[in-house]
Image (cartoon, rainbow, N blue to C red):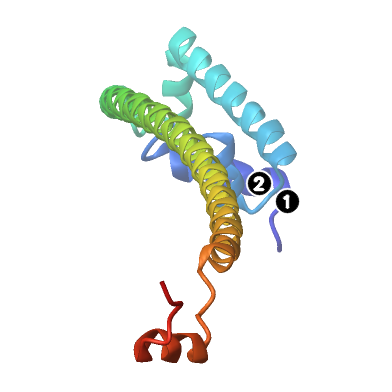
Amino acid sequence: MALSVKDRVFAAAEQISAERRPTVSTVRAAAGVSNADATRYLKEWVEEKHAAGGRLAATPATVLEQAARLAGACWAEASTVADERHAAAEAVWAQEKKDLGLEISELVIDLDKVGAEKDAAVTELTARVTALDTQAAAMKAQLEQARTAEQQASNTAAEAAARVAAAEARAETLQKAHDALLQRIVPETPDKNDRAKRTSGGGPQL
């Protein structure tokens, strides 16, 4: 016959309690029940265990009467086993607490390390951004200076070209004036007959 949900939770709790204190999660996984059922029936199991322990402590004679064959030796053995289990559970809990404390310490160290690395990275990136901003500002200033120099050079070249053109125009004008003046002052060539008369002595008589 299939066990009820309560029976499965109780059986799982009994089995787990042989090694460690049962919890809702361990009982739920072992019994294959819902979280609500595990919580509800595990609480009932714990209450029954506490009630049974109280009855044993308060009225050990009744227990001895119901288990006469076991007598006092069984009771003592049960108490010893319970004490051993309790001591073992305390040892496990202490070890788990120690391990957890160590893990927390390691996490804190790692967190501090990560925080320091983050701060260093932020500082380095900030310095890089500042350096790049400074470099960009310097390059912008140099570009503006180059543009200004280029504009000045262009203006100077335009002025020089205009001056050259004007000088060439003046030179051409002066050259034309010079040529015209030369044509006006060069004497006319004498007639060939006059030169022959002067040569033959046919000049005027005295």
> Is 119 or 12 nearer to us in this picture?
119
Q: Which residue is depicted at the point 50% across and 81% down?
A: 190
Query: Residue 115's x, y, as percent?
Result: 36, 25
What is the three-letter code of the residue carrying label 2? Asp
Q: Which residue is depicted at the point 47% across and 35% down?
A: 145
Query: Residue 74's x, y, as percent?
Result: 31, 29
Query: Residue 55's x, y, as percent?
Result: 52, 15
Q: Quadrant of the C terminus?
A: bottom left
User: Is residue 40 at all visible to an observer of this figure?
Assistant: yes
Mark 2 and mark 1 residues within 8 Å of each other at the beta carbon: yes
> Is 14 or 57 nearer to us in this picture?
14
Q: How many marks?
A: 2
Q: Quadrant of the N terminus?
A: bottom right
Q: Quadrant of residue 72?
A: top left
> Is 116 or 201 nearer to us in this picture?
201
Q: Residues within 10 Å of mark 2 (few under 14, many from 20)?
A: some
Q: Residues within 10 Å of mark 1 (few under 14, many from 20)?
A: few
Q: Which residue is identified by label 2?
A: 7
Residue at the far top in the pictured view: 58
Give left or right: position of 66 versus 40. Answer: left
Give left or right: position of 126 versus 52. Answer: left
Q: Which residue is depicted at the point 66% across and 39% down?
A: 38
Above or below, 155 against 175 in this view is: above
What is the three-letter code of the residue carrying label 1? Ser
Give left or right: position of 145 versus 18. Answer: right
Rounded to the nearest angstrom, the CA distance separating label 2 from label 1 is: 5 Å
Q: Which residue is identified by label 1?
A: 4
Q: Quadrant of residue 130?
A: top left
User: Is residue 76 at all visible to an observer of this figure?
Assistant: no
